Amino acid sequence: MLRDYATKYYLDQHRNCAVTLLMAANEQYQLGLEERDFALMAGFGGGMGCGDACGALTGALAALGLIYPKVVKDPSPAGLKEDSARLNREFEEALGARDCETLKKKYRVEQTKCLETVLLGCDVLERHVRALEGAPAQQATLTPEQVKAVKGLGFLRCKGTNNFNCRVITGNGKLSNAHLRRIAEAAEKFGNGEAAMTTRLTVEIQGVPYENIEPIRAFLKEGGLTTGGTGSKVRPVVCCKGTTCQYGLYDTFTLAEKIHKAFYEGWHDVLLPHKFKIALGGCPNNCVKPDLNDFGIVGQRVPQFEADRCRGCKTCMVEKRCPIGAAKLSQGKLSIDGEACNHCGRCVGQCPFKALEDGAYGYKIYIGGRWGKQVARGRALGRIFTSEQEVMDVLEKALLLFRDQGVTGERFADTIARLGFENVEAQLMGDELTRRKEEILGAVKHTVGGATC
């Protein structure tokens, strides 16, 4: 909740880091501050204007001064001083530094500025207040081996604690009422009562103590839910709402479910060089960024233009409706630029003289996309695929190729760059990988993959 308030004040109201933390804490902990009070923190932004102490930290310390006497029995100035020092240490342990200049280099990005630092500061303050309200601050006592063992089960450690976020697998973000109730109950019983969606449409139950990992897994399993979604494996499938969206060109939910069962579940124990992400977009609008995934599928409707029916209308409705300018009226005749056309299908049915009444449905496949520190846009294979089975076959061959020819630790984009796109495309269009499927899956490879989360 503190994160939500902070995001609102930082992005929507353009407050600085220090003011944002104090305003968010004021709302969450009902500190009774008014607008004019926040001006007291205005000069603490940007590390007090000189890159010194982080504004998120100074804002959190200011909030602590008001929170401390509310939650601590027999508060004292000496106790607050010690607790402030403890909050300083917790902030530095969680973020790696306390000064603005260092943290900017580590977390600042052009689009959202220092939001990540602000949100991490919120997490530190929230954990600190919870500790004040109950038991003393938890000490991290787990071994690296223990942390690694549960990561493979879908439990990611909360920095500096023995608590974990528990990733619950969903059907591309779809959950029944029974599943939602089970997750909410699990969060209350075994976590801190909160849950969040990931970018891959899994649900993370927050703040699960190490000793609650097996109990929460058993509880979720009773409700038909599993945890996971980490490691050098096929990751949970993501799809847009093309099944219901007005622009959707195929049933994204159905195909995504088939892929989920065949490759997320079916290949669950298959180790790959690195993680492998799959995304399905219902149309070229690209809402879920299929071309920034290892394997992306985009719905297509290739227009079937009958030029002899075109009457060269002064106002051509096909040209008018084309969102990317691929349809042009020139010298009294319509033409469609096949290179520019992205096959969105919006031109179909727009000609009153039925020059464009139909379009062939299909799928464009992108391979080798990824986002992160090293972004790579996937490249489309050279043909439009016309059936779900064709898509499933190419996907299987892509995974077989990655397992067989990928180097441990590299992403699929790197494998393609090393082997050459034309080489990879030829293998995906051929049958050799399918013939060698049993051999490829049976090989002992990639026992320590490249994925760290």
Image (tube, rainbow, N blue to C red):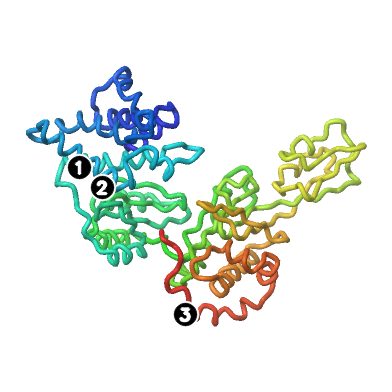
Q: Amino acid at mark 3?
A: Val
Q: Amino acid at mark 2?
A: Asn
The numbered disc on residue 192 is 2
Determine whether 28 is above or below 166 in the image: above
Position of residue 134 measured from the top left corner of the image (x, y, whole percent): 15, 43
At mark 3, the secondary structure is: loop
Q: Amino acid at mark 1?
A: Arg
Q: Is residue 379 left or right of residue 21?
A: right
Q: Is residue 189 left or right of residue 236?
A: left
Q: Residue at x 29, y 45 (%)?
A: 92
Q: Residue tagged by mark 3?
A: 444
Residues 446 and 335: in front is 446
Q: Residue tagged by mark 1?
A: 86
The answer to which of marks 1 and 2 sits earlier in the sequence is: 1
Position of residue 173 measured from the top left corner of the image (x, y, whole percent): 45, 51
Q: Nearer the viewer, mark 3 or mark 1?
A: 1
